Amino acid sequence: MKKPIDRRVFFKGCLSAASLALANPSLLAKTKGEIKLYSRARLVDQNDQPIKTASLKSKQCYVFNYPYVSTPCFLINLGQSVDQKEHLITENGQGYDWQGGVGPTNSIVSFAAICAHKLSYPTRTISFISYRPEQVLVDEQNQQSTAAQQVIYCCSERSVYDPLKGAKVLDGPAPEPLTTIILEHDVTHDEYYAIGTLGSEMYDRFFSRFEFNLALENQLENVAEHVTQSARVYHQSEYSEHLQSC
Ligand code: FES
């Protein structure tokens, strides 16, 4: 059964992030579209120490849970500067502007790790959706299939997303881009924070469908509890025991 979202926490999160936006207006002024702000959560390692730029290896993918304690997100260092804005459109026709990466070289990006098709996501045992830095074939059904590098590939029904372009859909049945997780890089302390989402969210459907599994896998009583202070970051190969490639 679907858990009701705790709106008090949500609005508290909104206020917290709104305060941040007031302190740093350029952050949100740059990010127009379907924005939802949640609590500002510091990204930390297994020892609860802040994630630094140097700990995010080039062309590697990490996973953390945000904005809910059970909802996984990809954190990727693309290994190249991505400062191009990308205009994207959700399934319901809402446009939004993705602003590229953050960090010293604009190479760090984050997206919900929940496929926009049928919500495949990384479980603790297996993940059918993962970041693939190597060359892979896209549109394999078609004789004109092309090779692509640096994609997010969902092997469930072969949806392919481009993380260099805001996780827009390159191929497959996914009807819209992956949800962007809005990151902030604190330049002074070299720390990273998740502050909200951009684009279409799928969390209500996700909880309706997977609440029981999520509670079991993560040993949670309330899978829809908000992340508030910090979010632990795992390498994607540590978050899931097995990464299914295709
Ligand atoms: S769930 Fe990802 S392609 Fe179907």
Image: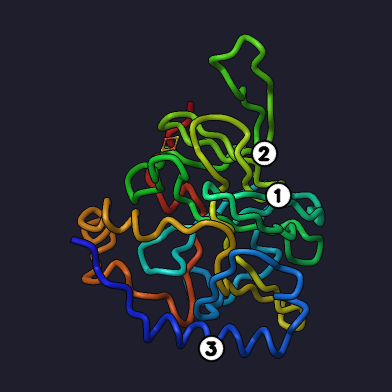
In whole angstroms, how far apart are the C-alphas of marks 3 and 1? 31 Å
What amino acid is found at the position of numbered circle 3 in the picture?
Leu
What amino acid is found at the position of numbered circle 2 in the picture?
Gln
Q: Is mark 3 within 8 Å of ligand 1?
A: no
Q: Is residue 97 above or below residue 144?
A: below
Q: Element type at marker 2? A: loop
Q: Quadrant of the N terminus?
A: bottom left
Q: Is residue 96 above or below residue 178?
A: below
* Picture coordinates of residue 70, whole percent (x, y): 35, 63
* Picture coordinates of residue 79, whole percent (x, y): 75, 49
Q: Element type at marker 1? A: loop
Which mark lies nearer to you, 3 or 1? 3
Q: Which residue is mark 2?
A: 150
What amino acid is found at the position of numbered circle 1 in the picture?
Leu
Q: Is residue 145 above or below residue 171?
A: above
Q: Which residue reaches farthest front?
A: 93
Q: Which residue is mark 3?
A: 15
Q: Are marks 1 and 2 in contact (CB under 8 Å)?
A: yes
Q: Which residue is mark 1?
A: 78
